[in-house]
Amino acid sequence: MYQLEFTESDVEEQLDEILCSFPTHGHVHLDATDPNTKTLVELVLSGAVTVFRDDYPAYYFIDSKDPAYQAYINVARHTQWRLNANTDIERCRINAFKAMLPYGEARSDGRFVSYPEHDILMHCGNLETYSLISAWEYKPSDLYLFPYPTLYADLCDSLTGRKYQSQYYVFKAADVSAVKQACNESIKRQFRT
């Protein structure tokens, strides 16, 4: 795992690549004028939040008997996720659960997947800055983000189920209470305008 370096000139572009990893219908990029984006940029540039990237082995197919698949099903029952949809986001989620198995039992409140034993939150796919900012109300020590895998067809062979390398990102707060307070202020400013 290594820490990403951000500068004022590239911070928005890098965060956009991390948070908006899949160009869905109606997809928009980070809005530099959004108060939540401004808060996130300030937190990252000040070092209050650091961002790390790491690789993990991902699989095109994970057997339904795999513990990661079972963890996914247990959490998915408490969400609006479509089960057995055979979509990229479902594969992304199951692979994320596989990578997160060492952190214990996963739970969901419908918004975020949490690993309470380690004060960790996890999210898969695109994440709006408002959602990232509001995640700090849970006071996690870390927020794991598993973006959509890129170049899916080039990275794996769906016929053999071969594994490939994918990346995840970890947002770590230096002082969780201070980050939570900054995020709460951002959300209040947004509703005042």
Image: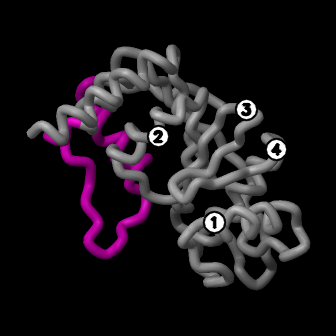
Q: In the picture provided, is 37 more to the left or to the right than 99? A: left
Image spot of residue 114 (x, y percent): 65, 45
> Which residue appears at 88% of the width and 67% of the height?
66
Secondary structure at numbered mark 4? loop
Image spot of residue 140 (x, y percent): 58, 31
> Which residue appears at 71% of the width and 42% of the height?
115
Disc 4 or disc 1, which is closer to the eye?
1
Q: Indicate the amino acid at tag 4.
A: Gly
Q: Indicate the amino acid at tag 1.
A: His
Q: CA distance from mark 1 to mark 2?
A: 18 Å
> Which residue appears at 75% of the width and 65% of the height?
74
Mark nearer the N terminus (4 vs 1):
1
Which label sits on residue 78? 1
Q: Residue furthest right?
A: 65
Which residue corresponds to mark 4?
Answer: 104
Q: CA distance from mark 4 to mark 2?
A: 20 Å
Secondary structure at numbered mark 2? helix
Q: In the picture provided, is 33 more to the left or to the right than 87? A: left
Q: Indicate the amino acid at tag 2.
A: Ala
Q: Nearer the viewer, residue 35 or 146?
A: 35
Which label sits on residue 118? 3
